Image (cartoon, rainbow, N blue to C red):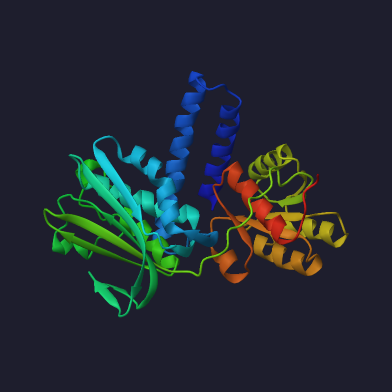
Amino acid sequence: HDFNNLLMVIRSCVSFVAGDLPHGDPRREELEVALDAVDRAAGLTQHLVAFGGRQPRQVAQHDVGRVAQELADSLRHAIGDRHTLRVSASAEATPAQIDRDQLEQVLVGLVENAREAMPDGGTVDVDVRAVTLADPLRRGGQTVGAGDYVRVSVQDHGHGMAPENLERAFEPFFTTRVEHGGRGLGLSSAYGIVRQSGGAMTLESQMRHGSCVKIYLPRAIPDREGVAPEAEPLLGARVLVVDDDRHTQRLVTDALRKRGASVICERDGTAALRRLAAGEPVDLLLADLVMSGLSGREVVARARALRPDVASVVMSDYASFVDHLGGEILHKPFSRRALFDVAARALEQRGWARAS
């Protein structure tokens, strides 16, 4: 929690300064290097959290094949000119209930892992399709139950893995490529995310023939297409921010005000609840989960009893709020885009309409 707070403050301050500099300015380029380092530090933390299956999520229905195809250009750029990426998806819809950011994290991690298995170049094949397993499937110590799934296969044509290494492949920090800078987090974090999403993952490998990772996500019933959100969805929103970290509070407040929201702040939950009890006009409560005194979870629970019309979002790097109370969670360290999106979604769920 404290580490992610520090990363968020660093990222926000650097991002604000970089945004004021013109493209091509060498100072902006140096700041972008710093932002990349912060993102990699946050990513390392999330890899470890993901393996434990405790990563906070924003679950929604996504067509996995469409996500893979939309991500293809970024993946090709990531693996470089010495490797070829082929992405295919079945014509049949491949919907699954999953956090999109986590899905992209899994795809990127597995493709990068496949690239590292072929240091001299080669082809990475990604295939997404709907499958039905009439009987349980057992591969490499992993079992996939019978049922309807979206299957994602990532195949490399590298050297393959020795049988004694297959059993340890999903362990965090286990890698056979230490000399190439491998950290042993790609497969383990993907495994944690897939397991948290109710799915399963298998690994098949043959020496001198390559490896194939297969993800099985429970197939969902397709939703109808949604309507795109309006621009500037926070214009006129009245937001109460509760956080005992003054740096985080200031950064969140400044970002919301720049998008047209009016913001009031409190350093503790008791003072925030007094405002709500007194009838102060508030559309959205934004509270940190870990604070001195009342926790964000307690503040939100009491706020809902006092003012059920007020939307709520908790800022945290823990999944317990979602598991035990429900509602929107903003995972630290977050970007301004994530802040705006989560706040807008929480307001929309309460039927709030932006100012015209």
Quadrant (top left/top right/bottom left/bottom right) for the C terminus: top right
Q: Residue most toward the right?
A: 278
Q: Residue most toward the front?
A: 91
Q: Residue most toward the left?
A: 208
157 shown above or below 149 = above
Q: Residue most toward the top?
A: 25
Q: Quadrant of residue 74?
A: top left
Q: Position of residue 166 (x, y in %)?
A: 20, 63
74 shown above or below 317 = above
Residue at 14% across / 54% down in the picture? 209
Tell me: 155 left or right of 254: left
Residue 291 appears anywhere in the view: no
Tell me: 83 left or right of 216: left
Q: Quadrant of residue 128?
A: bottom left
Q: Position of residue 269 (x, y in %)?
A: 73, 58
Residue at 76% across / 44% down in the picture? 235
In the depicted view, which residue is nearer to us: 202 or 231?
A: 231
Q: Position of residue 198 (x, y in %)?
A: 43, 70
How many numbered markers are drawn? 0
Tell me: 160 left or right of 26: left
Q: Quadrant of residue 219?
A: bottom left
34 shown above or below 240 = above
Q: Position of residue 300 (x, y in %)?
A: 70, 63
Residue 72 appears anywhere in the view: yes
Residue at 50% across / 28% down in the picture? 31
In the depicted view, which residue is nearer to us: 350 or 128?
A: 128
Residue at 71% across / 40% down in the picture? 259
In the depicted view, which residue is nearer to us: 317 or 36?
A: 36
